[in-house]
Image (cartoon, rainbow, N blue to C red):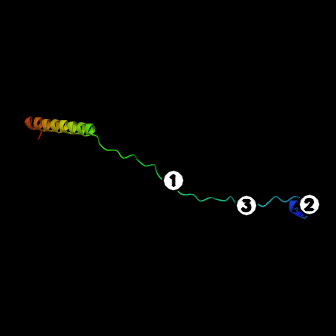
Amino acid sequence: MIDDFLSETQPSGALVPPPRNPPTALATTDALPPLRPSRTISQGEGLFRQIVQTTLDSLDSLGDSIAGAIGLR
């Protein structure tokens, strides 16, 4: 009908703004966190860690023996 295309007016003849519809929210799922690649310790890494650990243990023992020799412990 032609009446559907006509704007509404107030009794004084002023145009009425179209009704405001609230924005529609869309529901979505949360994004999954990215998967961390599984990391295995290679033999080279394991060997390096073992060497560092052994070196630090040796230095700790040396420091304890020096501290004992000069009377700090």
Q: Earlier in the sequence, mark 2 or mark 3?
A: 2
Q: Is residue 7 visible?
A: no
Is disc 3 surrounded by few (<14), some (14 to 19) or many (20+) residues within 10 Å? few
Amino acid tagged 3: Asn
**Which residue is identified by label 2?**
13
Between circles 2 and 3, the one closer to the viewer is: 3
Task: Tell me the residue at 26%/36% (across/down).
Answer: 44
**Which residue is identified by label 1?**
31
Task: Tell me the residue at 24%/36% (across/down).
Answer: 48
Q: CA distance from mark 1 to mark 3?
A: 29 Å
Residue 64, horizontal then vertical, whole percent = 13, 38
Q: CA distance from mark 2 to mark 3?
A: 24 Å
Q: Earlier in the sequence, mark 1 or mark 3?
A: 3
Q: Is residue 52 above or below residue 20?
A: above
Between circles 2 and 1, the one closer to the viewer is: 1
Q: Are marks 2 and 1 in contact (CB under 8 Å)?
A: no
Residue 20, horizontal then vertical, whole percent = 75, 60
**Quarter occupied by the C terminus:** top left
Residue 50, horizontal then vertical, whole percent = 21, 39
| SS label for mark 1 | loop
Is disc 1 surrounded by few (<14), some (14 to 19) or many (20+) residues within 10 Å? few
Residue 1, horizontal then vertical, whole percent = 89, 64
